[in-house]
Image: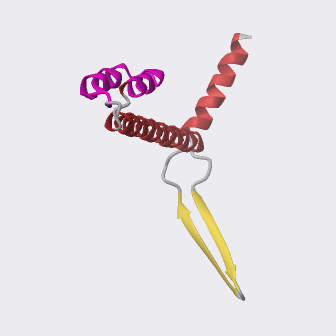
Amino acid sequence: MKFTLVAIGIALGAVAASPSMAQTSTCYRLGNIASCSVQPNSGENPIQQRYSGFQEVERLHKENEDREEAQRQQGLREEVGALVADGRCADARKTALRAGDFALADRAGAMCTPARKR
């Protein structure tokens, strides 16, 4: 059993340490003209390339989540600001509290003066 695990570990290490192909060829055909080019690999093995790809996807996913959160926060500030401008203090505080932004609720309450009834 131990020998099997060691053999599997050595095999995985050999695959990870050696590049699978020394070069990559790309061919295309346009009408009756065919063209091929050979490009050497960057020296990384396929496992490292795939891991780098996964890291890039995770980075882009995180950037997208951060951007969406910033847009959501900006929309909340605009909504609360419009309520404050209209003099609807209670609604402005409720909106901020429902979103979980206690600091914004406090600022809305401090800045807001209730609209006078005519």
Near-viewer residue (50 or 25): 50
The residue furthest front is 118
Near-viewer residue (67 or 35): 67
Asked if residue 35 lies left or right of residue 48, the reply is right
Counting from the top left corner in percent of width and height, residue 92 is at 39, 28
Residue drawn at point x = 38 percent, y = 30 percent: 88
Near-viewer residue (84 or 70): 84
Q: In this view, does 50 lie above or below 26?
A: above
Asked which colour scheme the image uses, the reply is secondary structure
Counting from the top left corner in percent of width and height, residue 109 is at 30, 22
- Whether residue 25 appears in magenta in the rendering, the answer is no
Residue span colored magenta: 90-115
Counting from the top left corner in percent of width and height, residue 70 is at 40, 38
Q: Quadrant of the N terminus?
A: top right
Counting from the top left corner in percent of width and height, residue 79 is at 41, 37
Near-viewer residue (115 or 11): 115
Asked if residue 55 lies left or right of residue 82, the reply is right
Residue drawn at point x = 55 percent, y = 39 percent: 54
Q: How many numbered marks, from 0 up?
A: 0
Q: In this view, does 64 lie above or below 6?
A: below
Residue drawn at point x = 34 percent, y = 34 percent: 118
Dominant secondary structure of the residues highlighted in magenta in the image? helix
Asked if residue 8 lies left or right of residue 41, the reply is right
Residue drawn at point x = 59 percent, y = 30 percent: 13
